[in-house]
Amino acid sequence: MLDKEAKPYKVDPFVIMIKFLLGHKWFKELWDVFLLPELDAIFLTSQSMCFPLVSLILFLFGTCTAYWGGLLSSASVRLLSSLWLALKRPSELPKDIKIMSSDVTILTIVLIIISWATCGALAILLTYLYYVIKIVHLQATLTNFKNSQTVNPKHPRRSEKKSNHHKDSTAHPLRLSASDAEDSLRMHSTVINLLTWVVLLSTPSLIYWFKNLRYYFKLNPDPCKPLAFILIPTIAILGNTHNVSIKSSKWLRTASQFPLPLAIGVIAFGSTQLYRVPSCVFISLFLHALCNFM
């Protein structure tokens, strides 16, 4: 759901059409009536019709960058999980699927306090590291489970049947099977890719705070603080989210309609003003997290 709209032929035509229409006075007046912000792009006229090709090339370049960044992120998770397996043998797949636990709640409160007392970008970075650790642990656990399945194939089948029995039963909490863990891992990989861009776009604020740390401990004004306050609980929920709870959500169909408008909004309003991009990413993550409750 989170990455299916990252296709130029779905996003770019809408943006190009809006840019062209904004070159006409009547459409510009209609645009102002709805109090919509100005586009972060060159307006198209009949004398500048070569711009769509340039826009498409830039969009393809950005899509390729995101794609290869996703591959690099997945490879890094696998490498870190191998290191995790070498240092510590992980436990079995999670038996009980809990969206929030006491430890996660305490960690969320601590990160929010860090965001308020120091720098929002620092809290976002720490939240990102927490999420990466969670996914590395899940990858290591899944790898360990597959290795044990290769050694003893009969036991995992009984375990998976038992897991499916608990999944279908309403008297017991949901349990995670190997296939569910793989689906969840793919979902978390997409979340990491989106969250990476939020961290990168908030890095200038973090660097500025770090350079001036000798003068003040709390960054004020902090452009990343409002985002950190709402992003931290969202990531805490997504960190304990599995594909089982997402698939059974009634909100999933509604939430799946938002990525395309958000992608259009990023291209239309965040091309030059990049501070708007994390907000669009957060909306997508927040809607995804709501699937656990609706």
Image (tube, rainbow, N blue to C red):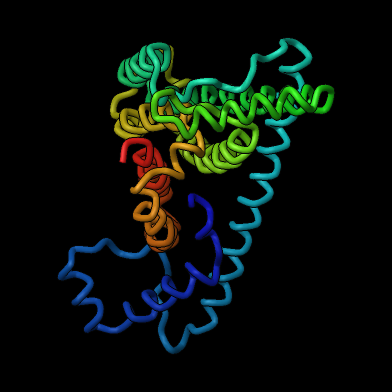
Q: What residue sits 42% from the left and 12% below the top? A: 103
Q: Name the residue at 63% across, 60% down.
A: 61
Residue 189 position in % (x across, y down): 59, 39
Drawn side of residue 74 relative to residue 241, left or right = right
In this view, which residue lies farthest toward the bottom?
46
* 157 sits to left or right of 96: right
Q: Quadrant of the C terminus?
A: top left
Residue 49, visible in the rendered structure: yes
Can you tell which quarter of the image residue 173 is in?
Answer: top left
Q: How many marks?
A: 0
* Horizontal relation, residue 29 to residue 291: left or right: left
- Tell me which residue sits at (65%, 45%) in the image: 69
Q: Between residue 233 and residue 175, name the one nearer to us.
A: 175
Q: Which quadrant of the figure has residue 53?
A: bottom right
Nearest the viewer among 257 and 8 is 257
Q: Tell which residue pokes out farthest to the left in this image.
A: 33
Viewer-side residue, 8 vs 77: 77
- Residue nearer the viewer, 77 or 248: 248
Q: Position of residue 270 (x, y in %)?
A: 41, 55
When the figure is inspected, residue 19 is found, relative to residue 108, above or below; the finding is below
Residue 207 seen from this side: no
Residue 139 position by quadrant: top right
Residue 21 image offset from top left, x and y in percent: 34, 81
Residue 73 x/y as whole percent: 66, 38
Instruction: List the single residue furthest toward the right.
Output: 151
**Above or below 132: residue 38:** below
Relative to 24, residue 18 above or below: above
